[in-house]
Amino acid sequence: MAYANNPNVIGPSEQAGQPNATQAAASSIRAVTWPYNKWASQSNEPRVALRPPVAAPDTEDPLILAIQALQQVMQGVLRTNRLISAPWLLMPPDGESLHQAGGIAMPAVDGNYHAILTIVCPAGRNGIINQIANTVVGGAFADFSGAFQWQIQRNPSSGITAAERNYQLIQAQLGLIDAPAPIAPIRIFENDVIVLAGQNLSLPSPGPSLGGLFGGWFYPRTWDDQWDARDRDNAW
């Protein structure tokens, strides 16, 4: 294809500061359709938004803007009050403390779990467990040695192991009777039977004894009923 000379367009040699050896002029077609000049040599703004643009306010009226800001603050207050009123996070004023310890002699190596401590959530009450102690008293037990292991079980029945999530296989002492370990709350409900059970894998029996503790609180189940009945608009 022959290109017509265009004196208004600078040729590539002249752009590079070199003499035009062929005396060829730049083509007007090059300025319009040549892919290099049309795309690569153009400086375009990036078209990818790195962050969403700030939405323009619906109104510029300062009174309306102040009302909208107040509504957002009140919504945050409602959510905070809802969180604070959760009976499994803060003990309600009519809650009842749970701090119960127990212990047994070291069981035989028989492949079974043996109850060290058992609590029952009273009728009409729900609750939480947020402290635990599980310890070998006496002897030379070492954590993670594989000589003994614990479980926290909920409503165990004959031949069925119903271990709580995260506490199916405890191989270390998480806390002592006089210094129980704080844990994320385990919610319990009326008539639940919660058991700290242990299995002897290689410790001598008779020998050291076992101790356990649950700490937390019970509260009237009506607190949960009120929570569930709250306005769903306050949910986060």
Image: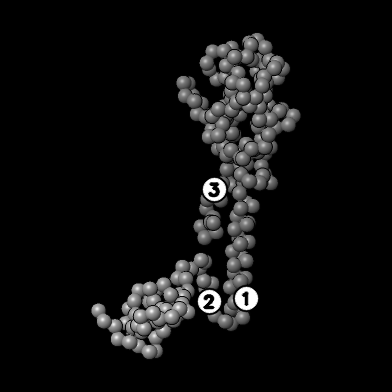
Kindly identify which numbered label has been placed on residue 235: none
Mark with earlier residue (1, 3): 1
In the rendered structure, which amino acid carries the disc numbered 3?
Answer: Asp
In contact (CB < 8 Å): disc 2 and disc 3: no
Taking depth in this image into account, of 46 and 161 the one nearest to the observer is 46
In the rendered structure, which amino acid carries the disc numbered 2?
Answer: Ala
Please tell me whether mark 3 sits on a helix, a strand or a loop. Answer: helix
* Left or right placement of residue 195 versus residue 102 in this view: left
- What is the residue that sits farthest to the left in this orientation? 1
The residue under label 2 is: 56
Mark with earlier residue (2, 1): 2
Front: mark 2 or 3:
2
Query: Are there few (<14), some (14-19), or many (20+) residues within 10 Å of tag 2?
Result: few
Residue drawn at (52%, 53%) of the image: 229
Taking depth in this image into account, of 8 and 223 the one nearest to the observer is 8
Residue 66, compared with residue 212, is above or below; it is below
The residue under label 1 is: 66
Q: Position of residue 171 (x, y in %)?
A: 60, 26
Q: Position of residue 182 (x, y in %)?
A: 67, 37
The residue under label 3 is: 225
Q: CA distance from mark 2 to mark 3?
A: 42 Å
- What is the residue that sits farthest to the bottom in this orientation? 7
Q: CA distance from mark 1 to mark 3?
A: 36 Å
Can residue 152 be seen here?
yes
Q: Quadrant of residue 179?
A: top right
Q: How is the image coloured?
A: one colour
In contact (CB < 8 Å): disc 2 and disc 1: no
Residue drawn at (40%, 81%) of the image: 20
Please tell me whether mark 2 sits on a helix, a strand or a loop. Answer: loop
Query: Are there few (<14), some (14-19), or many (20+) residues within 10 Å of tag 1?
Result: few
Residue drawn at (26%, 81%) of the image: 2
